């Protein structure tokens, strides 16, 4: 009976470790996503921040300094750095919510990737003489380009 309980306990411990490992991986991925997102927001809206906010965001996200290291360099407390960082992050997120430039940039980037794929298909179809397929790809590219320009008019 004791051996059976030990096996059961081991099973639950292993499951617990697996869960913790997966949870840790998810947290790391989430942290990387936040760093990338803040980097993009900083690229687009950083100059709209105060000088102090700009410096702290740059030191934290771009130069990967800790709150304590930033505080030492700027002669402010770790808590002060944290507060300024949180306010700056909120401002960047607010700018994006109002202006949507990063979202538009990423959407347009994806559309340009589709255009490049369509151009490759056109090259392949040219080699094989498939004119009907080429025309279809050209129309797809035109529609995507119009979508990027937010224009419903035909290209003349």
Image (tube, rainbow, N blue to C red):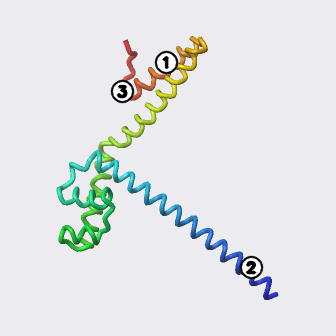
From the image, tell me which residue sits under label 2.
8
Determine whether label 1 and label 2 are within 8 Å by CB: no
Q: Nearer the viewer, mark 2 or mark 3?
A: 2
Quadrant of the drawing holding the N terminus: bottom right
Dot 2, crowdedness within 10 Å: few (<14), some or many (≥20)?
Answer: few
How many numbered marks appear? 3
Q: CA distance from mark 2 to mark 3?
A: 62 Å
Q: Which quadrant: the C terminus? A: top left
Task: Tell me the element at label 1.
Answer: helix
Q: Quadrant of residue 150?
A: top left
The image shows residue 139 at horizontal and vertical percentages of: 49, 18
Closer to the chain start, of discs 1 and 3, is: 1
The residue sitting at 35% across, 43% down in the picture is: 102
Q: CA distance from mark 1 to mark 2?
A: 63 Å
**Would you place residue 41 above or below residue 117 in this image?**
below
Sequence-wise, the earlier of marks 1 and 2 is 2
Above or below — where is 38 with respect to 100?
below
Q: Position of residue 6 (x, y in %)?
A: 74, 84
For disc 3, the marked residue is 149
The residue that disc 1 covers is: 139
Furthest-right residue in this view: 1
Within the image, what quadrant is residue 108 found in?
Answer: top left
Q: Residue at x 41, y 24 (%)?
A: 145
Q: CA distance from mark 1 to mark 3?
A: 15 Å
Is the C-beta separation of discs 2 and 3 under 8 Å?
no
Choose the circle earlier in sequence order: 2 or 3.
Answer: 2
């Amino acid at each position: 009976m004791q051996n059976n309980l030990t096996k059961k306990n081991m099973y639950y411990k292993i499951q617990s470790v697996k869960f913790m490992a997966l949870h840790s991986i998810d947290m790391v991925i989430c942290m990387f996503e936040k760093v990338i997102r803040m980097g993009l927001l900083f690229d687009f809206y950083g100059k709209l921040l105060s000088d102090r906010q700009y410096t702290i965001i740059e030191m934290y996200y771009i130069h990967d300094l800790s709150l304590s290291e930033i505080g030492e360099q700027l002669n402010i407390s770790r808590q002060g750095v944290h507060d300024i960082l949180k306010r700056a992050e909120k401002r960047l997120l607010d700018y994006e919510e109002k202006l949507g430039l990063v979202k538009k940039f990423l959407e347009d980037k994806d559309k340009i990737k589709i255009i490049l794929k369509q151009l490759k298909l056109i090259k392949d179809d040219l080699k094989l003489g498939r004119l009907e397929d080429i025309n279809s790809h050209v129309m797809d590219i035109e529609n995507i380009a119009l979508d990027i320009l937010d224009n419903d008019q035909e290209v003349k």
